[in-house]
């Protein structure tokens, strides 16, 4: 089986798994539209979050374990496409009337504050930070970028935490390329074996560099790396098995 056939097989397995998950989720929610009772076509049924602020992730389009999917399904109602569009059309009509009144000067113009999605805020809040002294030690040793990648957050979040811990502290940016040069790299054969055993981000954390540095080194030395989406397909195959 060549690479193209392997990719085609993985894509087919993911599609089958997604359809099985949706069928199970639809059955869990009663198997029909909660408003009109439609149940003929599986593709015409969607999951609508009752409260948008409580939404952690979308139900469709991603392979997730049933243990993670079930709590999110409890926040949703099962609707057909017609009922779902009717529900959102009523909301859009209210917003359109407000825009018309504001345009005519009937209500004062106001600046809308756009918050981050709740799932993004919760991801930042749920991040397990080390103790303050250890956290600042990481900042001084490996820099803001590598610390952000290590914790799985963006650089702005790391800088805000530094400001909260030690106001006025000036963080000297680290040169990622010099940091990569000082890293204790394994030989090419060992690095190639590591890349096909675990993701580049995991290897980067072990070496104390960024994942971009690992990919650059592989490019310079002609070391083949897994294609884009390889590890996601591996996880999907294991969950399907």
Image: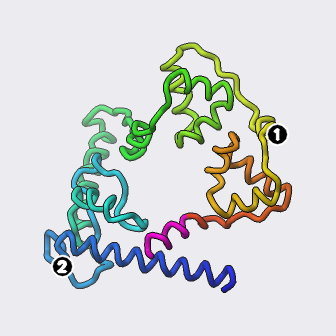
Q: Which residue is mark 1?
A: 181
- Above or below, 5 against 96 in this view is below
Q: Nearer the viewer, residue 230 or 15?
A: 230
Q: Nearer the viewer, residue 201 or 117?
A: 201
Whether residue 212 can be seen here: yes
Q: Circle 2 sits in a helix, a strand or a loop, which is it? A: loop
Q: Residue furthest right?
A: 221
Q: Nearer the viewer, residue 171 or 231?
A: 231
Tell me where residue 55 appears, x and y as whole percent: 31, 51
Q: Residues within 10 Å of mark 1 (few under 14, many from 20)?
A: few
Determine which quarter of the picture holds residue 36: bottom left
- Above or below, 151 against 80 in this view is above
Q: Which residue is mark 2?
A: 38
Determine which quarter of the picture holds residue 120: top left
* Point 76% across, 33% down: residue: 175
User: How far, Cα to Cα, is label 2 from label 1?
Assistant: 62 Å
* Point 60% across, 35% down: residue: 147
Whether residue 89 can be seen here: no
Tell me the magenta residue range.
Answer: 232-241
Q: Nearer the viewer, residue 200 or 122?
A: 200
Residue 123: within the magenta? no
Q: How many marks?
A: 2
């Amino acid at each position: 089986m060549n690479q193209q056939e392997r990719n085609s097989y993985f894509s087919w397995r993911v599609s089958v798994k997604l359809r099985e998950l949706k069928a199970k989720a639809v059955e869990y929610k009663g198997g029909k539209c909660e408003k009109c009772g439609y149940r003929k076509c599986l593709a015409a049924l969607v999951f609508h979050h009752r409260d948008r602020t409580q939404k952690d992730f979308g139900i469709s389009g991603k392979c997730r374990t049933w243990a993670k999917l079930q709590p999110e399904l409890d926040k949703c109602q099962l609707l057909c496409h017609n009922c779902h569009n009717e529900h959102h059309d009523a909301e859009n009509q209210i917003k359109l009337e407000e825009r018309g009144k504001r345009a005519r000067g009937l209500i004062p113009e106001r600046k809308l504050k756009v918050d981050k999605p709740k799932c993004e805020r919760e991801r930042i809040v749920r991040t397990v930070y080390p103790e303050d002294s250890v956290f600042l030690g990481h900042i001084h040793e490996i820099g803001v970028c590598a610390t952000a990648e290590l914790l799985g957050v963006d650089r702005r979040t790391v800088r805000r935490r530094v400001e909260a811990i030690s106001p006025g502290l000036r963080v000297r940016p680290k040169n990622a390329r010099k940091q990569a040069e000082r890293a204790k790299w394994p030989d090419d054969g060992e690095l190639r074996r590591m890349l096909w055993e675990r993701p580049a981000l995991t290897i980067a954390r072990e070496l104390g560099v960024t994942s971009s540095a690992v990919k650059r080194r592989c490019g310079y030395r002609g070391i083949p790396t897994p294609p884009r989406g390889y590890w996601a397909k591996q996880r999907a195959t294991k969950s399907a098995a």
